Image (spheres, rainbow, N blue to C red):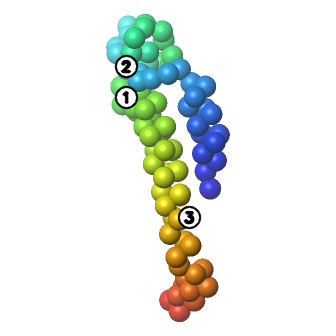
Amino acid sequence: MLDLNEIKAACEAATSGPWQCGPLTGGYWALAFQWSNDLLCSQNREADANFCVKARTWVPALVEELERARAEIERLEQYVPMKHLEAQANDRA
């Protein structure tokens, strides 16, 4: 299972987003703050740079969504006895 606290800590420690990418001399792409020209890293491929840029926003959003889903699963599990689920799984096997 993913350690969401570790992922959230990494997101919080990273340069705040959203990020953007643009061309550099030599065909590389740079990731930078939206509001500054700080170079964070460079990539040889535009697709990789775009993924890194989007991941800065996507990862925190996915962590929040996963936390909500886990909380909902935990809430719903109180209504379904686990022995019933185990018996269903054994019947299917």
Q: Which amino acid type is marked by label 1?
A: Asn
Q: Which label sits on residue 24? A: none
Q: Residue 39 location, x and y as percent?
A: 48, 11
Q: Element type at marker 2?
A: strand
Check disc 3: other Cα within 10 Å, few if <14, some if 14-19, many if 20+.
few
Q: Position of residue 52 (x, y in %)?
A: 44, 30
Characterize the local packing of mark 2: few (<14), some (14-19) or many (20 or more) Cα atoms within 10 angstroms.
Answer: many
Secondary structure found at label 3: helix
Image quadrant containing the C terminus = bottom right
* Residue 22 position by quadrant: top left
* Residue at numbered disc 2: 21
Quick one: quadrant of the N terminus?
bottom right
For the point 38% across and 7% down, which residue is it? Answer: 25
Mark 2–mark 1 distance (CA, rounded to whole Å): 7 Å
Q: Amino acid at mark 2?
A: Cys
Dot 1 corresponds to which residue? 50
Instruction: Check contact, mark 1 vs mark 3: CB within 8 A.
Output: no
- Identify the residue at the far bottom of this view: 91
Q: CA distance from mark 2 to mark 3?
A: 39 Å
Observer-nearest of 67 and 50:
67
Residue 56 in the figure: left or right of residue 90: left
| Residue at the spot 48% in from the left edge and 38% down from the top edge | 59
Observer-side mark, 2 or 3, equals: 3
Query: Would residue 46 be found to the left or right of residue 42 on screen?
Result: left
Residue 43 seen by the camera: no
Q: Please tell me which residue is depicted at 43% across the width and 32% down the height of the picture.
A: 57
Which sits earlier in the primary sequence, circle 2 or circle 3? 2
- Say which quarter of the image contains residue 46: top left
Give the labeled residue for mark 3: 74
